[in-house]
Amino acid sequence: MSDVPTTDAPFDPSLIRDPPPQPLFSVRRLVIVALLVGGFAFLLYSCHGAPDSGGGTGCSNAAVAAWDPCPGSRILRQAQVGVELRPGYDGRIAINGIQIPEDQMEGAIVPGTDAYSQLTPDERALGPRPNNKNLVKFQPGKGKAIETFNGQLSISITYWLEKDGPSAADSISYTVFTL
């Protein structure tokens, strides 16, 4: 090999020193724990929403499987609102007194689209929401009955068992607030 001596001494593991002991409650550790607890509390609050503020029905109704969002919650201006009814129910939604056309509700299949052309004549006879009658939801947007939400929203859901029809309808109303 080479006759040049190396200046690197072999590594001596006995020179490794343990780091000095750290106090259990250092400022850094307390700040990290406080941030984690605060973040967790914020997450719980934002997922649960604000408590019902008198304008709603609470989050319980025999016909409703899921609220989107729960009464009294705060939402973004372009958020989807409404309910998922239990299977076998159908319904309509009105927001601040404005009846939302069924073809503007979430899940509607609009005539002239590829999805509409794939429906059977029996499915087309069921209306714009042949496969999801129990989803009674609306999301605002350009060209829709409501383009953006603002302030307090009074949401009214009219619902009925499909076998009984709209003549046997019942309704629930609740309020949500935009951020």
Image (spheres, rainbow, N blue to C red):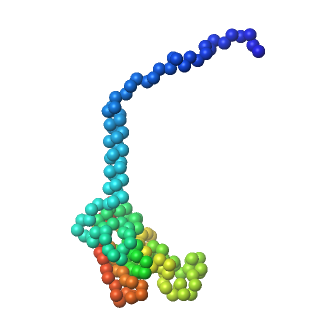
Q: Which quadrant is the C terminus positioned in?
A: bottom left
From the top left corner, tell me how far across and down residue 114 is, in percent: 59, 76
- Left or right, residue 23 beside residue 12: left
Residue 163 visible in the current orientation: yes
On screen, residue 174 versus residue 118, left or right, reads left
Residue 46, image x, y percentages:
34, 57
Q: Nearer the viewer, residue 40 or 62?
A: 62
Q: How many marks?
A: 0
Residue at coordinates 31% horizontally, 63% vertically from top-left?
73
Quadrant position of residue 18: top left
> Is residue 129 found left or right of 85 in the rendered image?
right
- 108 or 90, which is in the foreground? 90
Residue at image coords 30%, 77% = 172
In the figure, is residue 154 to the left or right of 117? left
- The N terminus: image quadrant: top right
Residue situated in front as seen by the camera: 113 or 131: 131
**Residue 9 rendering spot, x and y as whole percentages:** 61, 13
Q: Quadrant of residue 60?
A: bottom left
- Residue at x 25% of width, y 70% of height: 55
The one nearer the camera, 141 or 23, is: 23
Q: Could you tell me if residue 154 is visible in this image?
A: no
Q: Is residue 89 above or below residue 142?
A: below
Residue at the image position 34 percent from the left and 55 percent from the top: 44
Which residue extends farthest left? 54
Residue 21: percent from left, percent from top: 38, 25
Quarter assignment of residue 100: bottom left
Residue situated furthest front in the rendering = 14
